[in-house]
Image: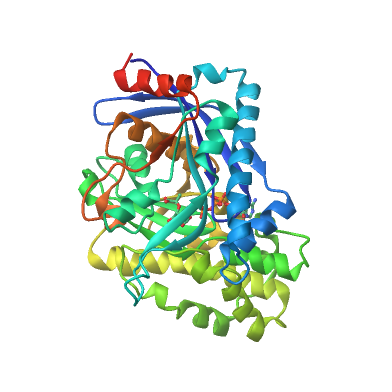
Amino acid sequence: MGKALGVGLMSGTSLDGIDAVLVEIEEKKDNVDVNIIDSLTQHYDTDVRNALMEVCSPSTATLQKINSINMFLGKEFGSVVNKLLKQANVSKNDIHFISSHGQTIYHQPFDGESNLDVAGTMQIGDISVLSEETGIAVVGDFRTADMAASGQGAPLVSYVDYLLFKNPNKSRAIQNIGGIGNVTYVPENSNSDGIQSFDTGPGNMVIDEVVYRLTNGKRNYDKDGEMAYRGNINQRLLTKLMSHDYFKKEPPKTTGRELFGNQFVDEIFKEYGQMNPEDLVATVSEWTVLTIAHSYNQFLMDKGYKIDEVIVGGGGSYNPYLIERLNYHLPEVIIFTHEHFDISSDLKEAMAFAVLGFQCILGKYNQLPSATGAKRQVIMGKIAYTQPDALERIDTLRRGS
Ligand SMILES: Nc1ncnc2c1ncn2[C@@H]1O[C@H](COP(=O)(O)OP(=O)(O)OP(=O)(O)O)[C@@H](O)[C@H]1O
Ligand SMILES: CC(=O)N[C@H]1[C@@H]2OC[C@@H](O2)[C@@H](O)[C@@H]1O[C@H](C)C(=O)O
């Protein structure tokens, strides 16, 4: 079969909005060729963002709220896809599949003490609703399959980072700075077994929440690092933040709002809420950078894995303060952003999920045990369709005709 058309959807841990990409995608011998034809980003309204924040926190989530927002988001994702197709002037009858990450509301990558307290992860934005809204088959719920094989359920983009950035002569760290930060280490000339991947810690999550509180809800993030640039780093707070147990843990490891969400920021404000606001923003921004640099030193370079290049993506790559400080803390490596490789930092995750969904439909492995710590390779994703013609279009993909 020639090229397939698919839509990738991502709603990340920053809770800033939905990224959608229309892609042309084709299977190659040891690779997948993927090109973005069109894209759309829709930011969440404040009431939606607040409602999502509520269901991400055990102290404010209720079963009723989770139940409703799961359906609401399915519709919202569907409306974004319909807008994107209209913008691109493409009919839904030409789209083979949608692949949706969903919205993570809870991620617990480890078993608890009781035998009922089992590791799990939950992404909402119902895929049957999304299929019904668009008339297209939908792949979703990727992370559970990796966890079923005892993996961390994240990071999953590592598989696509490997396809996009493997290089015979350069060892690369592909760093996402989203709500959470995560790295994929792709050593030079490696096969996929050589990949290492883990969440480095908070990305923009804590910076965003601190800025939101300090500006009484007027701003959601520190645009272009403006506040951080005006502040001074408070070493006492920085040392305290760096002493968090997460940074001592060996990879593979993943984290999220459960550790670095609102309750964590409550603790910072209890002791440091009276600090100069710009100093506070500078300090938590520096912390994000230090967690990245220390992770590289501790878990990669000190263990003999060289890094020639760091390639930064995610919304944090648009914050010059973070990039400047990363350069300062990693003087021996060259730091690029994804744009240097003609890949949008904003859209890569949506594009990556299009690739993962495509592989799921074809019945191909789309996960790397070396990245997630899973016991074996699995095919991640579940498929939903509510109309026969939607099934027919994914069947044509499978038949290769
Ligand atoms: N110009 C900018 N200046 C500073 N920060 C920015 C800028 N643009 C984006 N950001 C940051 O990027 C964040 C969004 O990043 P991104 O969309 O990569 O996160 P995400 O996909 O939700 O997260 P994750 O990858 O953890 O799931 C914003 O919340 C903001 O903090
Ligand atoms: C559980 C979950 O949603 N984790 C996200 C989060 O956001 C960044 C980091 O933490 C990463 O581990 C993961 O997302 C990306 C898309 C991934 O799986 O590669």
Instruction: Name the spot of residue 103 as percent of width and height, x first.
Output: 53, 50
Q: Give the color scheme: rainbow, by chain, secondary structure or one colour.
A: rainbow
Instruction: Name the spot of residue 287 as percent of width and height, x first.
Output: 52, 70
In the foreground, 275 or 133: 133
Which image quadrant is residue 375 in? bottom left
- Residue at the spot x=41%, y=19% of the render? 392
Q: Is residue 131 above or below residue 324?
A: above
Query: Looking at the image, how many numbered discs can be counted on the residues?
Result: 0
Q: In this image, 62 relative to 180: left or right?
A: right
Q: In this image, 28 relative to 79: left or right?
A: left
Q: Is residue 30 visible?
A: yes
Q: Is residue 308 visible?
A: no
Quarter that holds the C terminus = top left
Quarter that holds the N terminus = top left
- Residue at the spot x=64%, y=40% of the render? 76
In the foreground, 308 or 27: 27
Q: In this image, 94 relative to 183: left or right?
A: right
Instruction: Name the spot of residue 358 as percent of width and height, x first.
Output: 38, 31
Instruction: Name the spot of residue 185 as percent of width and height, x first.
Output: 32, 53
In the foreground, 162 or 333: 162
Q: Is residue 197 above or below residue 259?
A: above
Q: Is residue 202 above or below residue 148?
A: below
In the foreground, 27 or 294: 27
- Residue at the spot x=24%, y=66% of the render? 303
